[in-house]
Amino acid sequence: MTTTVAGLGFGSVALAADTVELGFIGPLTGGVSSVGLGGRNSAELAVALRNADPDSKYHYELQVLDDECKPNVGVQVATKLAANNDVVGAVAHYCSAVAMGTVDVYHRFGLPMTVWGAVLPDITYGNDYPEITRVNGTMINQNEVAAKFMTEQGYKTWAVIHDTTDYGKGHNKYFSTYLAENGGEILSSFGVTSDQQDFTAELTQIKQGNPDVIFFAGLTPIGVRVRQQMDKLGIDAVFQGVSGIKSDAFFDGLGGDLAEGSLTFLEGAPAEKLPGGEYFLSEYEKAGYDRSPEAYGPFAFAAMDLLIDAVETVGPDREKIVEYMGTVENHESITGPISFDANGQNTVARITSYVAQDGAWVVWEDSEYADGTRSLPGMK
C-alpha cells in the first residue's frame, strides 16, 4: 500500500516505491451504465498497459466508484475518494450534473481530477479550480456544429424537448443560440424531468406545430421514451439528439427500425478513426471486455494515460500533479494532442455527425444518407 508523510495535508507526498493509487468514477449502474462501464474498462486498460510496461516507475492500482449519474451519490463517492490521501489523482464523470456537484469536493481536497465525458462548459469554465481538467470537448462545440449541419440539410423548424438538469438546459441554450444564427426557428420548447415517463402532452402540442425536427437534449433513457411515443402519435419528424444518446443502449431500447435516421453529434471521431484508435481497439479486444468502450471510452483511456504520465514525470504528489496538468500542451494521446487552456479545458477541434443506420451509429459522411441512397424525412 502507498504510504504518505503524516501531517502534510492533502498535498502530501507518497513515499512507497511500489504502488500508486488512482481513482475512476462513472455511472456503473442505471440508465447510462453502458457508457460508464465502457469508460471504466477503458481506464482500467490504460492502467493495465502501464503496469505491463517494464519502464514504468510505479505499479498502479485503480479504485473504481459508481456515481449512478446522480449528483448526491457523486458527491458521496467523490468525497470518499478525495479524502483518501493514498489516491493521488482521478478520472471522473460522464454526467454533467454529477460533475458540477463534485468539482468543489476535488478543489477542497486538492485532488487532481480529469473529466472523461461530461460536456457542460461550466465544469471547467464556471470556476478557476486548477485541480479540474477535461480531455473531451463541451456542448458548445457540439451545438455549433449541429445547428449548422441541420440547417444545411434544409430543415427550418424545430420543437425542443430538454431535461431540466443543467445538462439539458445547457444544450437547449447553446443549440437555440446557434440555430437562430443559422436561420432556424424553434416553434415550441418543453422542459421535462429526468424521470418522466409520459410525454403525450408535450408531443401532442408539438404535433400540432408540425416541426421538421424534434431536438432532444438529455440522456438515452428519456430519449428512447420520447422516440417511442413520437411513433405512437404518428409524428413524422427527424429525431435529433445530443451526445447523450450516442450509446449502444439507444438501439437496445428502440431496435434498429425505430432508431433509424436519428442524428447526434460528438466531439472527436469514431475510435477506429482516432490517431491511436486502432491500437486502442486492438488492446481493448485483447483484454476480453464483454461490452464496447462506447463513445467516450477513448477519452477515459486518454485521461487515465495522461494522469499516469503526470505521476511518472513528477511523482505521486497531488500538488505536483495539479501543477503538471496546468502545463499540458500538445500531449500526444490516442484521441489526438491534448492542450489545456487556462481553465483546464482541452480544445477538441473536430465534431463528428452521426446517423443511426441499420442498428449502428454511422459517421454521416460514410452513410447512405449522405450519398443519397436513403433520405431523412423532409431532407432536400
Image (cartoon, rainbow, N blue to C red):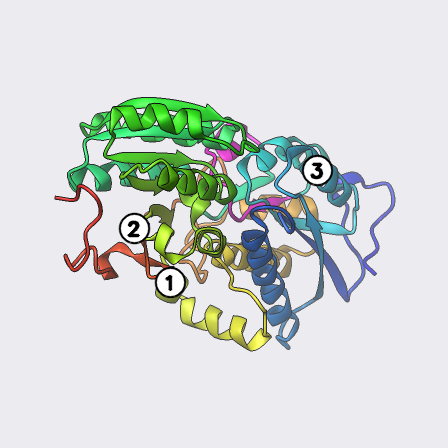
Find the distance from the CA under tag 3 to the CA under tag 1.
33 Å
Task: Give the number of the mark in front: 1 or 2.
Answer: 2
Find the distance from the CA under tag 1 to the CA under tag 2.
24 Å
Task: Give the number of the mark in front: 3 or 1.
Answer: 3
State the image quarter where residue 309 is shown. Answer: bottom right
Image coordinates for residue 194, horizontal then vertical, percent: 55, 32
Q: Pointer 2: what residue?
A: 261
User: Looking at the magenta stretch, what is its main secondary structure?
Assistant: loop
- State which region is magenta: 112-129
In the image, is residue 140 above or below residue 257?
above
Q: Quadrant of the N terminus?
A: bottom right
Question: Which residue lies at the image location 59% right of the left edge and 74% below the top edge?
Answer: 287
Question: Which residue lies at the image location 31% right of the left edge and 38% below the top edge?
Answer: 234
Asked whether disc 2 touches disc 3, contact meaning CB atoms under 8 Å apart, the reply is: no
Depth order, front residue of 132/209 = 209
Q: Which mark is residue 274?
A: 1
Q: Pointer 3: what residue?
A: 73
Closer to the chain start, of discs 2 and 3, is 3
Does residue 70 appear to the left or right of 80 in the view shown? left
The answer to if 250 sits in the magenta stretch is no
Task: Give the number of the mark in front: 2 or 3.
Answer: 2
Depth order, front residue of 334/93 = 93
Closer to the chain start, of discs 3 and 1, is 3
- Type of amino acid at the residue the image marks with label 3: Val
In the image, is residue 369 above or below residue 288?
above
Closer to the chain start, of discs 1 and 2, is 2
Image coordinates for residue 184, horizontal then vertical, percent: 21, 28
Disc 1 is placed on an element classified as loop
- Type of amino acid at the residue the image marks with label 2: Gly
Disc 3 is placed on an element classified as helix
Work out whether residue 83 can be spotted: yes
Question: Which residue lies at the image location 55% right of the left edge and 65% below the top edge?
Answer: 291
